[in-house]
Amino acid sequence: MELDTKLKSDAAGTASGQAAGKKVFVKTYGCQMNVYDSQRMTDALVADGYAATDDMADADLVLLNTCHIREKAAEKVYSEIGRIREMKKERAALGRETVIGVTGCVAQAEGAEIMRRAPAVDLVVGPQTYHRLPAVLEKVRSGGKVVETDYALDDKFEHLPQPKRAELARRGVTAFLTVQEGCDKFCTFCVVPYTRGSEVSRPVAQIVAEAERLVEAGVREVTLLGQNVNAWHGEGLDLEGQSTEWGLGRLLFRLAEIPGLARLRYTTSHPRDMDDELIAAHRDLESLMPYLHLPVQSGSDRILKAMNRRHKAEDYLRLIERVRAARPDIAISGDFIVGFPGETGEDFEATMRLVREVNYASAFSFKYSPRPGTPGAEMDGHVPEQVKDERLQRLQALLVEQQQAFTGSMVGRTMPTLIEKAGRQAGQRVGRSPWLQPVIVDEKAGGIGEIIEVRIMSAGYNSLHAEPV
Ligand code: 5AD
Ligand code: SF4
């Protein structure tokens, strides 16, 4: 098997013409950044002559854009490859070729190992090299297998083609925009610093240009993405026109000036990077939605230290107080890990206490999953699976209770809602509340892309039913 790890970057984006008439199917796993990346990969391939399809069986090229954050996520990929291999055989019997590619964080973490375990895979491309996909495919066409997992040899974002306006419009009125990628924090449980590499911020001008393009195509709400989005920093201008260092807060103030950009969000943040200007943005910007995803992982200082989070539980609680003082209606969301190595019953109770004190509007919680190559995996005191299960159950019960109370508290309130798409039932549309909840309204209430004032009539498990006021 020929493994070619080096392709010249200047081959990027050259339309080979050989892709004409071919179809690509991309399946996305994991976080929102993968959703964004899948779109950019599709854009790069469409520019090369491919057509995007939603039907895997009809695709000449199947890409799995993968996630490595927990073992379960990574294992899913191999079972999916098994299924696709069968499909590849069926298509081959009809004389149709199928190229299988693995991209994203599993690609980065496992590289050529993927082909050893799953020989049906033709190409493995890491998150920093998507712009070189057309060149990689050229290589595969001439009979090779390709592994491309170099870290940013050149600027991934600068080299990715942007979608055509019509394609953007088709994608809807909300959009993701990656502003930052990678992480230098090295929490001891986390693979991200290894799979996504060190922190890279996109320049202000690139971000503003992309946001403006999105708005021109009809997007009303933009969510800025980054593994450590509030670590974003860049060079901008101050009021006197002098070049100065900007943080995410300043960037949000700038983006809020774009006419027609009605709503801004950002995710995911680290408590260490919540600075005064970002908190001020929550206080001053009407278009910055009152929602903050701020993972804490644990409420125990001992475990926070072992996790290398570099803050104490008390720091997090005071930070939440400051954010709430700036924006009293802000909804707080978080991530938690139970059963990190060394976590005692008392440590877990500290997490439960913190959750009670914060009162979350929503949250994600996970059992610790040792990731190869991370310091946590090498630590002593791994917690038995059964104990992890019990803790997760207790934590999730509390979090669900809080989330239900939050959703329930919306009944009777009026709020602006962005109408996003057709509902599942005929005659309905689904909108989005400022707090990210789906809001179901009658289709006569407003057109897609409109922001209408509604009154919440009832609350379901996670969604709200509303009438226009
Ligand atoms: N095990 C369990 N959960 C993890 N997360 C990250 N790494 C691990 C791991 N090894 C969780 C964290 C993070 C979220 C995206 O995934 O809570 O915030
Ligand atoms: Fe992972 Fe920690 Fe970086 Fe978040 S801050 S991506 S949890 S290392």
Image (cartoon, rainbow, N blue to C red):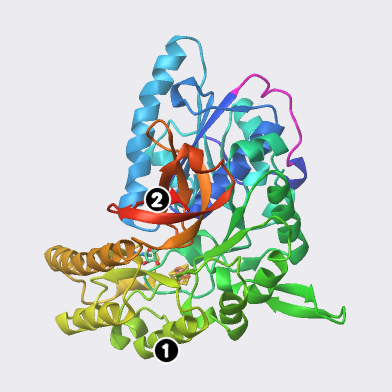
Task: Work out how far the residue at label 1 is from the one at label 2, CA to CA, in angstroms.
Answer: 35 Å
Instruction: Name the one closer to the observer, 50 or 445.
Output: 445
Query: Which disc is residue 318 wearing?
Result: 1
Task: Please tell me which of labels 1 and 2 falls first in the chain.
Answer: 1
Query: Which disc is residue 466 wearing?
Result: 2
Look at label 1 and name its amino acid: Arg
Q: Within the image, what quadrant is residue 369 found in?
A: bottom left
Q: Within the image, what quadrant is residue 12 found in?
A: top right
Give the percent coordinates (x, y) of residue 198.
Answer: 58, 68
Give the percent coordinates (x, y) of residue 162.
Answer: 71, 44
Give the percent coordinates (x, y) of residue 408.
Answer: 29, 62
Left or right of 48? Residue 280 is: left
Left or right of 449? Residue 107 is: left
Instruction: Name the one closer to the observer, 255 or 442.
Output: 442
Q: Judge whether 125 appears above or below 211 on screen.
A: above
Give the percent coordinates (x, y) of residue 361.
Answer: 35, 68
The residue located at (69%, 63%) in the rendering is 202
